[in-house]
Image (spheres, rainbow, N blue to C red):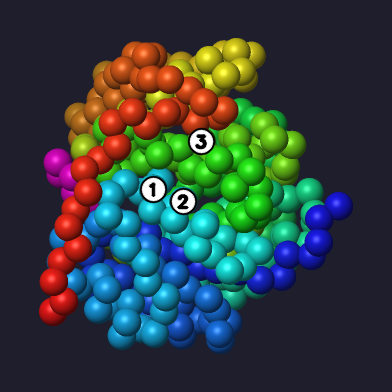
């Protein structure tokens, strides 16, 4: 049995979006709890605005010289002071009581991760006791356990697993699924994952046009890579994950024939990404449950102060 996990560090990984970061940090300040440890991890921003935003908000700041979301997440985990590490995105706004409702689930020592809701602007954010709170127990359920906009982890569990897979996630070729990969790995290690809908963030940055298509292609690349990796480290789990992704891919393919829309373009991009990600990572070595990052991104010089 683990010791009680009663402290948390909020980690915000961000790059070149100081205005969005400022809005998020203000919402964290206003919706507490007071004294929350907040750490901004600057993912190699090429200007001084990110540091300035963190300093104005009075929160901790650390800069990664190399871009990549998973690289930044791992820095956040290492630098966190809390028992629980809570991630949210710089393009979000937090709802009331978002931290206490997450931490409450960690009172069960078997829980290794908790996710919350991501709402569109204008959606109701009232905290309520939702009968549809879900507990996940099987590795394959990590595909549906949550998302990077609001997720919390037992810090020790993440460190024991070697951290987030730095080949996956925004800023890398396989630009997605680092969150789902970690949920799957947490479950495979024997922890429970809980989805707690009473904890919520509002996602403010709605992608449009080519940005939306590129986003979904990145998700597909990461998802394909995730399946390919599990086929190598745990064949039965990999086959099960592959079957789920294949079934959903077929559904997407059928949907493509029925519509011509923004969503259809995104579906095509995601499908192409899944195939490319699956094939493209076949020769990347795997160590433990992570890809070996043979070609890490180049460093970005620290910008001069404003």
Query: Which callout, 3 or 2, points at the residue further toward the start of the chain?
Result: 2
Alpha carbons under labels 3 and 2: distance apart? 14 Å
Residue ID for mark 2? 74
Q: Quadrant of residue 55?
A: bottom left
**At which x and y percent is residue 22?**
30, 76
Question: Could you tell me which secondary element the residue under label 3 belongs to?
Answer: helix
Of 157 and 179, the residue lying toward us: 157
**Residue sitting at x 66%, y 52%:** 156
Question: Could you tell me which secondary element the residue under label 2 belongs to?
Answer: helix
Question: 39 left or right of 233?
Answer: left
Q: Are marks 3 and 2 in contact (CB under 8 Å)?
A: no
Query: Which callout, 1 or 3, points at the residue further toward the start of the chain?
Result: 1
Alpha carbons under labels 2 and 1: distance apart? 5 Å
What's the magenta bit mostly, secondary-structure-wise?
Answer: helix
Q: Quadrant of residue 131?
A: bottom right
Query: Where does the magenta region start and end?
Result: 207-212
Question: 66 left or right of 115?
Answer: left
**At which x and y percent is residue 289?**
55, 29
Quadrant into which the C terminus falls: bottom left
Question: 5 left or right of 291?
Answer: right
Residue ID for mark 1? 71
User: Local crowd at mark 1 within 10 Å, few (<14), some, or many (≥20)?
Assistant: many
User: Local crowd at mark 3 within 10 Å, few (<14), some, or many (≥20)?
Assistant: many
The residue furthest right is 1
Question: Could you tell me which secondary element the residue under label 1 belongs to?
Answer: helix
Residue ID for mark 3? 181
**Does residue 127 sit above or below 264 in this rendering?**
below
**Residue sitting at x 47%, y 73%:** 38
Of 301 and 125, the residue lying toward us: 301
């Amino acid at each position: 049995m683990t010791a009680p996990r009663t402290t948390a560090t909020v980690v915000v990984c961000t790059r070149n979006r100081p205005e969005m970061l400022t809005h998020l940090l203000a919402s964290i300040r206003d919706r507490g709890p007071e004294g929350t440890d907040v750490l901004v991890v600057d993912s190699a921003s090429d200007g001084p605005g990110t540091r300035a935003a963190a300093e104005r908000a009075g929160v901790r700041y650390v800069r990664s010289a190399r871009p990549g979301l998973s690289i930044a997440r791992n820095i956040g985990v290492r630098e966190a002071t809390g028992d629980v590490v809570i991630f949210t995105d710089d393009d979000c706004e937090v709802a009331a009581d978002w931290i206490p409702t997450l931490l409450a689930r960690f009172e069960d020592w078997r829980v290794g991760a908790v996710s919350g809701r991501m709402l569109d602007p204008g959606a109701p954010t009232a905290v309520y006791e939702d009968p549809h709170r879900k507990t996940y127990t099987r590795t394959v359920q990590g595909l549906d356990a949550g998302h990077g906009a609001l997720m919390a982890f037992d810090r020790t569990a993440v460190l024991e697993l070697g951290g987030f897979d730095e080949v996956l996630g925004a800023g890398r070729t396989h630009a997605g699924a680092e969150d789902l990969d970690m949920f799957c790995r947490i479950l495979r290690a024997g922890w429970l994952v809980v989805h707690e809908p009473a904890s919520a963030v509002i996602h403010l940055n709605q992608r449009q046009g080519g940005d939306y298509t590129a986003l979904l292609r990145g998700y597909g690349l990461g998802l394909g890579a995730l399946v390919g990796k599990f086929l190598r480290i745990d064949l039965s789990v990999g086959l099960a994950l592959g079957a789920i992704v294949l079934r959903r891919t077929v559904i997407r393919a059928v949907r493509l024939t029925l519509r011509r829309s923004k969503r259809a373009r995104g579906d095509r991009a995601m499908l192409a990404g899944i195939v490319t990600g699956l094939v493209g990572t076949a020769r990347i070595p795997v160590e433990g449950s992570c890809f070996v990052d043979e070609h890490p991104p180049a460093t970005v010089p620290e910008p001069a102060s404003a």
